[in-house]
Image (cartoon, helix red, strand yellow):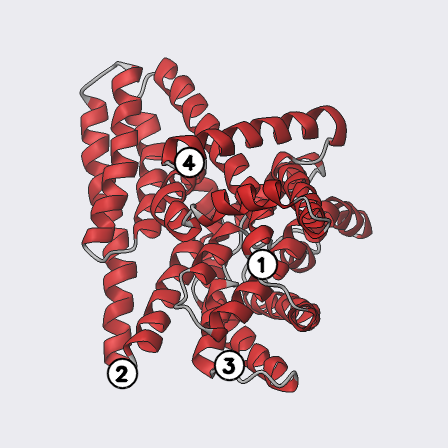
Amino acid sequence: MDILNTLAILITLAALFSYINYRYIKLPTTIGVMLIALIISACLIIAGKLGMESLFVYAETILRGIDFHQTLMNGMLSFLLFAGALHVNLKDLAQQKWLILSLATLGVVVSTFLVGGLTWLVLAAFGLHVSYLYCLLFGALISPTDPIAVMSILKKAGAPKSLEVKIAGESLFNDGVAVVIFVVLLGIAVGGTEPTVSGVALLFAQEAIGGIIYGLLIGYITFSMLRTVDNYQVEIMLTLALVMGGYALAHALNLSGPIAMVVAGLLIGNHGRQYAMSDATQFRLDNFWELVDEILNAVLFVIIGMEVLVLAFHLEYILISLAIIPLVLGVRFVSVAFPVKLLSRLRSFSPRVIEIMTWGGLRGGISIALALSLPLGPEREVILAITYLVVAFSILVQGLTISQVVKGNLSMS
């Protein structure tokens, strides 16, 4: 099936599922869309088992024609990160900079090694001999958090603004850092060469620090062009060019595109908004990127929900996932608690911030996309299945209960 028909089907499904959710289910859009997609997928699987295979085969064919890793990592992600960064206030971010920086760097590294080590032990206990390096890859891909499904819930639950900034800011940067760590580990696993400290440090610096510098450069170039025009159509096209062309060039230069998009988005959304845009342009630019964000997220969660049709699930994988889910949450608790306790000597934090950020650290499409990029083999099958189940639990269970967790913890304070 060609890309136009595939895109037409996905957007149509996203629109229908969003409508059904808005009219009848009334869950947060991304959670509702994914839940409906999962229900439809389950119905198609049951229909296939009952002999009505044509619909199941048709849906499976469409999904197998979508390269989810390429679609998200080299397509959607640049738009989603830029749109997210565009609406983050740098002054608010600066107030939380040390916590966000520690969570997005040290927190991701600690999470990678703790989750990787514990996963290796769990898999060994089930008699599955997956190499420690592949377990570290799982630790890296499951570490980035996704605020999409939880931010609207936090606002409705009356969470403090500072808490929203912490969760949004952390997720913007830990996406890029986790991807860099994953790429480094994957290069070691696939290359089969013995890693050196200097080699790993150089590769990390090239991806991460290079991504920051590159993001500042393309952001400043775009900002300079925005200052010389006062036409919202041209200005929106310039930001589109920044995202699409800038991300593609970052990939070609072996720099971190995700980090570059976050940095460029922060620059345009703050410095650019203040010095290079009229009020009319700001209004239209915000509406445009909010719409892009909503459409892409709806499509993304439709794909996540339908992806169950093409994944291999065995009872053993489900049992392993049930063991790993609390471990992932436990590691998340540790990675949040350590910097909060350390920094609490210097500043105050919102009540119960550790508990709320632990439960609100949802995993999303990036984790699945990274798992799908693993080389074919038995390790990929088990890691992909576990990743999907951890993400599904995260979005559906944590996402649907985070409001109660926030209200309960705030009422206790």
- Of labels 3 and 2, the one closer to you: 3
- Mark 1–mark 4 Cα distance, whole angstroms, equals 25 Å
Give the image location of residue 384, x and y in percent. Answer: 53, 64
Q: Tell me which residue sits at (29%, 16%) in the image.
A: 233
Give the x, y percent position of residue 2.
Answer: 37, 36
Q: To which residue does mark 4 refer? A: 83
Q: Residue at x 41, y 47 (%)?
A: 72
Residue 184 lies left or right of residue 35; in this view the side is left
Three-letter amino acid code of the residue under disc 3:
Val
Give residue 380's mark.
none
In the rendered view, would you say 389 is above or below 196? above
Task: Using the rendered image of the protein, determine whether residue 161 is visible from the camera's viewpoint.
Answer: no
Q: CA distance from mark 3 to mark 1?
A: 18 Å
Mark 1 vs mark 4, foreground winner is 1
Q: What residue is pinned by disc 1?
A: 388
Checking the image for residue 130, the label placed there is 3
Instruction: Tell me the CA gap for discs 4 and 3.
Output: 38 Å
Q: Quadrant of the N terminus?
A: top left
Numbered disc 4: secondary structure: helix
What secondary structure is marked by label 2?
loop
